[in-house]
Image (spheres, rainbow, N blue to C red):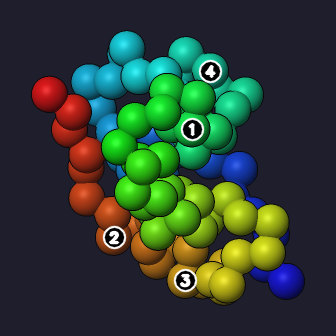
Amino acid sequence: MVPKSDLPCWEIMKCTGTENCPARKHPDMNCWEIASEVDDYRKAFNICKDCIVYMLKAENSVLTKQEMQTIIQQKRECVLV
């Protein structure tokens, strides 16, 4: 079993310019829990379970530690406008 990632979602996604991001304001919560509370499109389309952050933070991730590291290293910067 591979240990889950302890990195916050904004580090995994390499987000910039997100000072108003709800995840940064509530770092003790997982981003998919925040999306569920906000009840936005992510919940409606159930996309969080397909998100790399969700997969990396899952208790029983199907990804190996090497796969996790490779994904994080190759992830491009996410810029929210």
Look at the numbered discs 2 and 4 and tell me whether their residues touch, using CB distance below 8 Å: no
Q: Which mark is residue 67?
A: 3
Name the residue tied to disc 1.
36
Between discs 2 and 4, the one toward the N terminus: 4
- Residue at horizontal 37%, vertical 16%? 19
Q: Could you say where residue 12 lies in the image, as x and y percent from the top left? A: 47, 52
Left or right of 13 in this view: 61: right
Q: Position of residue 46 (x, y in %)?
A: 47, 59
Instruction: Identify which amino acid the numbered label 1 is placed on.
Output: Ser
Q: What residue do we see at 80% from left, 66% from top?
A: 59
Instruction: Please tell me which residue lies in front, 71 or 55.
Output: 55
Tag 4: amino acid: His
Check residue 74 in the rendering and tell me which mark sits there, or answer none: 2
Judged from this view, the residue extending furthest toward the front is 44
Location of the N terminus by quadrant is bottom right
Q: Is residue 80 left or right of residue 4?
A: left
For the C terminus, the quadrant is: top left
- Is 57 rendered above or below residue 18? below
- Compared to residue 11, the image places residue 46 above or below, namely below
Residue under pointer 4: 26
